[in-house]
């Protein structure tokens, strides 16, 4: 009950701040105040608008917002988001472009389960839709999953990926972004031994902690500084009575958000102070740069407690993937069994979350692959988010990834394909 009360207290604090923002905005909008100009009243209305919007976003899942896309024929086509596989902890979505022939490239984009929704990859999806059939893993907020659905740890996550790959078939090209990179590599190796015909054509790992100790960062050091007992005591709570997952152990999204913000508190404080002044001067808009970023950044989801704890213990502390000692359902997963799936790694030179060296470690683990089926790219000047969104992704990384996919689309890599890879 103690951890459940803490969960409800955090939700109460969030709700109260949202109410205070709405109240300040409403009071400052009282018609009588329009009789004279008062900067303090304008500032209060602006603070209320920004506060209400910010705290409201923390409790809502963002919409994909992808209504249509311009294709190679120069026409706009409607995009229908279809659920092709539905599971308790996550679904497989397909972005179906109406009126367009099925594309040759079939991509499974594996989204992280690290506090934000899969919509964090919205710009990545938008950049791929015109040339590809795009499928995305859409992980659910753990607070909405009843306890009766059972546990969900990194082994379950891996088996979900195995099922998604089996469903899509062997002509799939998998792109894993950040946190799921090591588990996607493990899922591919699991298929290589258990169901070789279901393996994807290629696997692109973007900024993932395959070997966190290769180049330690503050994120990896945190895993070393705390014990599992301390982590469980301070980070894990039970979902409160307001949600379907009541009683489930989770790492709450609001607690995660407080950690995200505290890492760059000065920058976030300045961003919100500047936004309040822009609103007060009438210079802000509903979809300006601040709102576009923070509408997504503040939308956080609860992570299953066992998933979070097993990730820290087995990936970061014990390095089971890096040592090729990962076990799923009692079966050792040998990454060396991958013999016909081309593997590419992408890293950002300025990535302070998964630093250069952590992801490329995957290539050394793929002992069964010839060098012609391995590739790597280090993007100069790119940070963590820049390697899958923004200018670096659009102009440099995306074309290289698509070239790698095309080079490894045949049943057997030819000499030309090998050179391209």
Image (cartoon, rainbow, N blue to C red):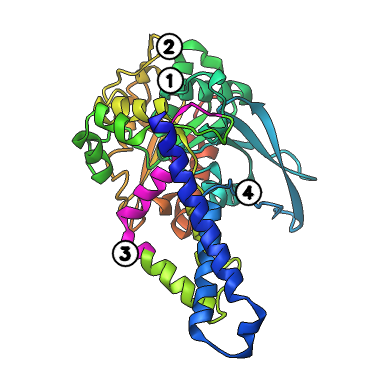
Residue in the foreground of this view, choosing between 8 and 365: 8
Return the disc, 2 or 1, that comes first in the chain's sequence.
1
Which residue is painted at 58% across and 51% down in the image?
Answer: 127
Residue tagged 4: 64
Q: Residue 281 in magenta?
A: no
SS label for mark 1: helix
* Span of residues in magenta: 245-268
Return the disc, 2 or 3, that comes first in the chain's sequence.
3
Give the image location of residue 387, x and y in percent.
42, 50
Residue tagged 2: 329
Which residue is painted at 63% across and 89% down in the image?
Answer: 35
Q: Is residue 205 above or below residue 341?
A: below
Residue tagged 1: 155
Give the image location of residue 207, x and y in percent.
37, 42
- Residue 249 appears in view: yes
Q: Are marks 2 and 1 in contact (CB under 8 Å)?
A: yes
Residue 336 quadrant: top left
- Alpha carbon distance from label 2 to label 3: 45 Å
Tell which tag, 2 or 3, sits nearer the viewer: 3
Q: Is residue 102 above or below residue 129?
A: above
Q: Residue 250 in magenta?
A: yes
Residue in the foreground of this view, choosing between 157 and 264: 264
- Alpha carbon distance from label 2 to label 4: 34 Å
Residue tagged 3: 266
In-image side of 414 versus 99 (left or right): left
Which residue is painted at 28% across and 31% down in the image?
Answer: 316
Q: Mark 3 packing: few (<14 Cα in 10 Å), some, or many (20+)? A: few
Give the image location of residue 232, x and y in percent.
31, 29
SS label for mark 2: loop
- Alpha carbon distance from label 2 to label 1: 7 Å
Return the disc, 2 or 4, that comes first in the chain's sequence.
4
Return the disc, 4 or 1, that comes first in the chain's sequence.
4
């Amino acid at each position: 009950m103690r951890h459940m009360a803490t969960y409800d207290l955090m939700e109460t604090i969030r709700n109260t701040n949202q109410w205070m923002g709405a109240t300040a905005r409403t009071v400052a909008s009282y018609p009588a105040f329009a009789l004279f100009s008062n900067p303090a009243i304008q500032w209060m209305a602006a603070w209320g608008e920004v506060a209400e919007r910010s705290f409201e976003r923390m409790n809502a899942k963002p919409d994909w917002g992808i209504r249509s896309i311009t294709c190679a024929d120069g026409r706009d086509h409607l995009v229908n988001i279809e659920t092709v596989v539905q599971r308790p902890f996550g679904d497989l979505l397909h972005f179906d472009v109406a009126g367009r022939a099925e594309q040759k490239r079939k991509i499974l984009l594996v989204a992280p389960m690290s506090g934000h929704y899969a919509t964090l990859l919205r710009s990545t999806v938008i950049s791929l839709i015109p040339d590809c059939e795009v499928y995305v893993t859409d992980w659910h907020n753990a607070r909405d999953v009843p306890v009766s659905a059972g546990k969900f740890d990194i082994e379950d996550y891996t088996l979900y990926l195995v099922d998604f790959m089996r469903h899509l078939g062997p002509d799939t090209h998998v792109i894993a972004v950040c946190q799921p990179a090591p588990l996607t590599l493990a899922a591919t190796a699991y298929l290589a031994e258990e169901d070789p015909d279901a393996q994807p054509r290629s696997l692109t790992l973007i900024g993932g902690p395959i070997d966190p100790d290769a180049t330690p960062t503050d994120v990896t050091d945190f895993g070393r500084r705390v014990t599992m007992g301390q982590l469980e005591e301070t980070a894990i709570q039970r979902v409160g009575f307001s949600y379907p997952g009541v009683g489930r152990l989770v790492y709450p999204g609001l607690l995660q958000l407080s950690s995200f913000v505290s890492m760059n508190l000065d920058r976030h404080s300045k961003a919100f102070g500047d936004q309040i002044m822009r609103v007060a001067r009438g210079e802000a808009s509903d979809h300006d740069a601040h709102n576009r970023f923070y509408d997504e950044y503040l939308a956080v989801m609860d992570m299953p407690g066992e998933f979070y704890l097993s990730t820290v213990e087995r990936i970061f502390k014990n390095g089971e993937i890096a040592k090729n000692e990962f076990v799923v359902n009692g079966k050792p997963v040998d990454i060396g069994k991958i013999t016909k799936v081309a593997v590419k790694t992408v890293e950002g030179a300025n990535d302070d979350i998964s630093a250069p060296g952590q992801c490329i470690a995957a290539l050394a683990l793929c002992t069964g692959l010839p060098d012609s089926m391995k590739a790597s790219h280090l993007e100069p000047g790119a940070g963590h988010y820049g390697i899958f969104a923004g200018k670096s992704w659009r102009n440099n990384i995306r074309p290289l990834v698509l070239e790698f996919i095309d080079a490894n689309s045949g049943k057997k890599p030819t000499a030309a394909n090998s050179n391209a890879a």
